[in-house]
C-alpha cells in the first residue's frame, strides 16, 4: 500500500518535528497538513523520528520493576534470592539502593587496598636498594661490573 503522504509532506514532517520534537509541533503539523494528530504521529513513528515521552511515575521518576530491584540486589551480592520479589516495592527499592551503594564502597575500598599494597611494595624495593647502596661491598661489587 502506498503512503498517502507526499514526499514533500514527509520532508515537512521530518524538518519541523526534528527541529522541535514536541506535541505542539505535531498539533501544528496536523492543522497545516489537514490530517489527524494520530496520523501525524503514526507517520513520524514509521519514519523513525518520533520521540516518545516515556512513562513516568507520579513523582516523575522512570519506573523500575520489582524484578529489576531484585536483580540489582542479586547481582551486587552475587547470589540468587528466591522469593525476594514478594517484598513490597518500596522495601526492594531501599534494599537495592543500600546494597548497590555498599557494593560500590566495598569495590572502591578494595581498589584502595590494592593501591596501598603496591605503594608498600615499591617502598620495600626502594628501601632494599637503599640498603644495598649503603653496603660498601655491594657498591664495590657493582663498580667492578
Image (cartoon, rainbow, N blue to C red):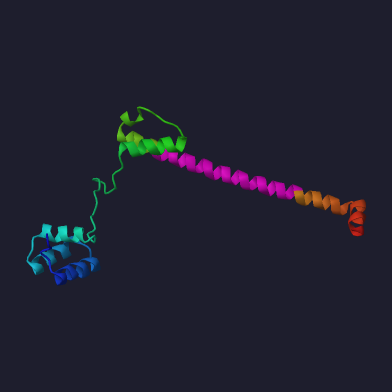
Count all numbered tags in the image, as a single digit: 0
- Residue at the spot x=10%, y=69% of the render? 32
Q: Nearer the viewer, residue 138 or 63?
A: 138
Residue situated furthest top in the rendering: 83
**Residue 115 inside the magenta-drawn segment:** yes
Expressed as whole percent of the image width and height from the top left, the position of residue 130 reads 82, 52
Expressed as whole percent of the image width and height from the top left, the position of residue 15 reads 21, 70
Task: Write the start and end of the magenta stretch as one range.
Answer: 96-124
- Vertically, is 14 above or below 85? below
Residue situated furthest bottom in the rendering: 8
Q: Quadrant of residue 66?
A: top left
- Residue at the spot x=16%, y=70% of the render? 7
Query: From the viewer's perspective, is 73 left or right of 108?
Result: left
- Vertically, is 121 above or below 35? above
- Vertically, is 4 above or below 67? below
**Quadrant location of the C terminus in the rendered image:** bottom right
Query: From the viewer's perspective, is 14 left or right of 112?
Result: left
- Residue at the spot x=40%, y=40% of the render? 97
**Quadrant location of the N terminus in the rendered image:** bottom left
Query: Mostly what secondary structure, the magenta segment?
Result: helix
Query: From the viewer's perspective, is 137 left or right of 91?
Result: right
Q: Quadrant of residue 53?
A: bottom left
Query: From the viewer's perspective, is 9 left or right of 73?
Result: left
**Residue 66 inside the magenta-drawn segment:** no
Expressed as whole percent of the image width and height from the top left, the position of residue 112 reads 59, 46
Expressed as whole percent of the image width and height from the top left, the position of residue 25 reads 17, 65
Residue situated furthest front in the rendering: 1
Amino acid at each position: 500500500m502506498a503512503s498517502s503522504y507526499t514526499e514533500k509532506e514527509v520532508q515537512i514532517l521530518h524538518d519541523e518535528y526534528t527541529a522541535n520534537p514536541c506535541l505542539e509541533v505535531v498539533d501544528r503539523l496536523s492543522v497545516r497538513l489537514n490530517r489527524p494528530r494520530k496520523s501525524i504521529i503514526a507517520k513520524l513513528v514509521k519514519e523513525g523520528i518520533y520521540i516518545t515521552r516515556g512513562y513516568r511515575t507520579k513523582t516523575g521518576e522512570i519506573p523500575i520493576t520489582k524484578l529489576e530491584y531484585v536483580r540489582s540486589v542479586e547481582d551486587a551480592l552475587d547470589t540468587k534470592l528466591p522469593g525476594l520479589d514478594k517484598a513490597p516495592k518500596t522495601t526492594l527499592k531501599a534494599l537495592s539502593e543500600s546494597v548497590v551503594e555498599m557494593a560500590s564502597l566495598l569495590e572502591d575500598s578494595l581498589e584502595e587496598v590494592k593501591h596501598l599494597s603496591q605503594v608498600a611494595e615499591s617502598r620495600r624495593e626502594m628501601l632494599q636498594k637503599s640498603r644495598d647502596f649503603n653496603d660498601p661491598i655491594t657498591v664495590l661489587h657493582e663498580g667492578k661490573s
